Structure formats: structure tokens, C-alpha cells
Amino acid sequence: EAAVTQSPRNKVTVTGGNVTLSCRQTNSHNYMYWYRQDTGHGLRLIHYSYGAGNLQIGDVPDGYKATRTTQEDFFLLLELASPSQTSLYFCASSDVGTGGRNTLYFGAGTRLSVL
Amino acid sequence: AQSVTQPDARVTVSEGASLQLRCKYSYFGTPYLFWYVQYPRQGLQLLLKYYPGDPVVQGVNGFEAEFSKSNSSFHLRKASVHWSDWAVYFCAVSLDTNAYKVIFGKGTHLHVLP
């Protein structure tokens, strides 16, 4: 079964702080994603990648950087955290098939609070 | 623009009652549709998926959904709700032209009364 592991599960930082969220998948999937989940907005795509060294911009990228170091590892970086980035962050992976057959496998999430 | 609408932010049903969670999508191409479930303090899990073919698809735990092209809908149903179904349910569409792109609805919170 697909496995996506996120760390840490909870994180508290201060405004202007530097935060790195980690994600590792053991599914041998090509695609990895970072989403944020906020009440009233559902899930919104921040960044995604289709392989090591690749990065694509999602729908809400401002204030976030990401890096895909290997096929397994995808990191989300907040270099100057702001209170508006307080959210629940999910990493996901998929082996994107043809014609939109894109089943996502999610991690358990990281709850980030920026004070 | 492509979108997914879940008109009900919250649905409350009694245990043992039937359930329908509504989902409408807006997309002019071929939609690939999904329902995901998020149990408390967990990530999202796939409940069921629709690829073009039989409009009624079966999922886990007795859930099913029906695709309607004429209504642009993909409603989720269950004949008899269990207390363990208390969760948030997300409808999503994957685009045939941009396979990476998955658009989520805002989710429906299902509350189950004893």
C-alpha cells in the first residue's frame, strides 16, 4: 500500500521564522504535491514536482519554496513565516496515469501555527 | 474555469439513515471524478473514483456514487450510515488535459447522531 510520511506532525513558529516541512513517499511515484487545507477553502495546491530536481508552481505559491531532492523526498520551505500561513499542510504522491487518472495518496498532515 | 462545488458545508444524519452528499463540477472535457474521506486527525483517503464508463461506481464501506453528465454531478450515497462515517468528504475532479491537476471541493462535514 502507498505510504506518505510527513514530519513534523505539529509545528509552532514565530512571525519571520524559518520552517521546513518534510515529506517522504515509498510508492515509487513520480509526482509529489504540497497542499494547504483551510476552513472554507478546501485543499489548495502550493507546489508540485514530477521528479527529482523538478519543481512546478501550484495555485497558491506565494511565500513558499519547495525542493525535490530525490524521488522519495519533497520539502516545503517557509523562509519568512507569516500568520497567514497558519494552516494544515498535506503532502501527496501519485503515479499520474493517462487521461487524468490521478489518484492521490496523502500523508497524515502537518499542523503549522505561526504566532 | 474548472471547479467543484459541494453545496452543503455540513450534513447531519442519524445512524442507520441513508445519506447523499452532493457534488457538482464544471468542466467541458472528460472528467475523472473522485470522492476522498478525511477522518479526524488523518489525511485524505480515496473512497471511490469514476473513470468514463459505468455511471455508478462502488467504493469502500458501502459507499457508491453516480455520475450524471447532463447534471454535471457526482453525488455520493450510502444506504445506512454508521457512526464511524463521521468525517469530512471531499469531491474532486482530475482533468484529462492536465493530468497533474486535481481540483477539490471545499468539503462536506458529515455528523452522525446516535
Image (cartoon, helix red, strand yellow):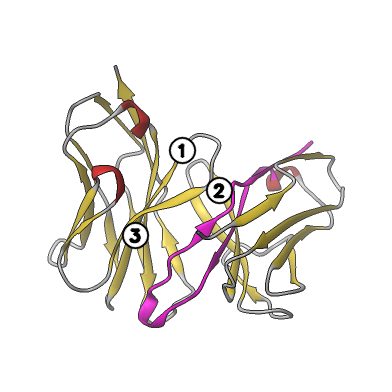
The span shown in magenta is A86-115
Residue A37 is tagged as 2
Cα distance between the residues tagged 2 and 1: 14 Å
Other-residue count near label 1 (Cα within 10 Å), few / some / many at <14 / 14–19 / ≥20: some
In the figure, is residue A94 to the left or right of B37? right
Label 1 vs 3, first from the N-terminus: 3
Residue A69 location (% of width, % of height): 77, 73
| Numbered circle sitting on residue A114 | none
Mark 2 touches mark 1? (CB < 8 Å)? no
| Chain letter behind tag 1 | B
- Residue plotted at (74% across, 42% down): A83
- Name the residue that disc number 3 marks: B34
Question: Label 3 is placed on what type of residue?
Answer: Phe
**Residue placed under numbered mark 1 in the picture:** B39
- Residue at the far top: name it: B114
Cα separation, mark 1 vs mark 3, equals 16 Å
Instruction: Report whether residue B1 is seen.
Output: no
Rendered location of residue B65, percent (x, y)? 21, 53
